[in-house]
Image (cartoon, helix red, strand yellow):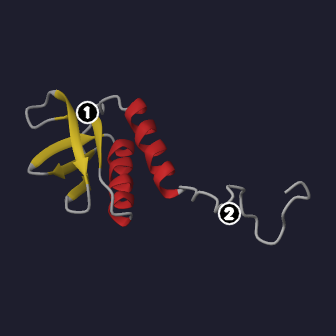
Amino acid sequence: MMHVTFADKSLLLGDDAALALLDYATALADHGRADQVTLRAIGNDGNEVDVRMVLDAGIIIAAETTNITVEPPENAFNIADIRRRLNRLVHRVAPAPTRSDGFPHDGDHWPEEY
């Protein structure tokens, strides 16, 4: 479990969820983007809560290890979603350049039929 501080809120998240959150927040900041994610957490009162967070370059998130032995909330679906978004952001493929006639540009190697 990790103790995560986000926008004046203190939350407990499983390690995988906390690390996915930090990785995605870092990538969004690096790319000058923002996004909203939802995770299941344990709030200050000890109850499980759904937390919707807006991540951007201006937000500060801290995560620290804990020795709490409580079972972390289930976040497998949310973690997979965050990792998909992270992968899509980091591995974006730029569109292939095209010629003025709409055909794709492939350097000096144009197929015979063009």
Q: Residue 92: image x %, image y %?
A: 53, 55
The numbered mark at residue 99 is 2
**Mark 1 Cα-neighbour bin, 10 Å: few <14, some 14–19, many ≥20:** few
Residue at the right extreme?
A: 112
- Residue, far bottom: 108
Percent across and percent down for residue 47 are: 14, 27
Does the residue at mark 1 contact the one at mark 2 (Cβ under 8 Å)? no
Residue linked to disc 1 = 70
Q: How far apart are marks 1 and 2 (CA)?
A: 59 Å
The residue lying toward the viewer, choosing from 22 and 90, is 90
Instruction: Work out which quarter of the rendered image holds the N terminus and state it.
Output: top left
Which of disc 2 and disc 1 is earlier in sequence? Answer: 1
Task: Specify whether residue 66 is in view.
Answer: no
Q: Please name which of the two marks, 1 or 2, marks the residue nearer to the observer.
A: 2
Which residue is pictured at 44% across the width and 45% down the height? 85
Helix, strand or loop status at disc 1: loop
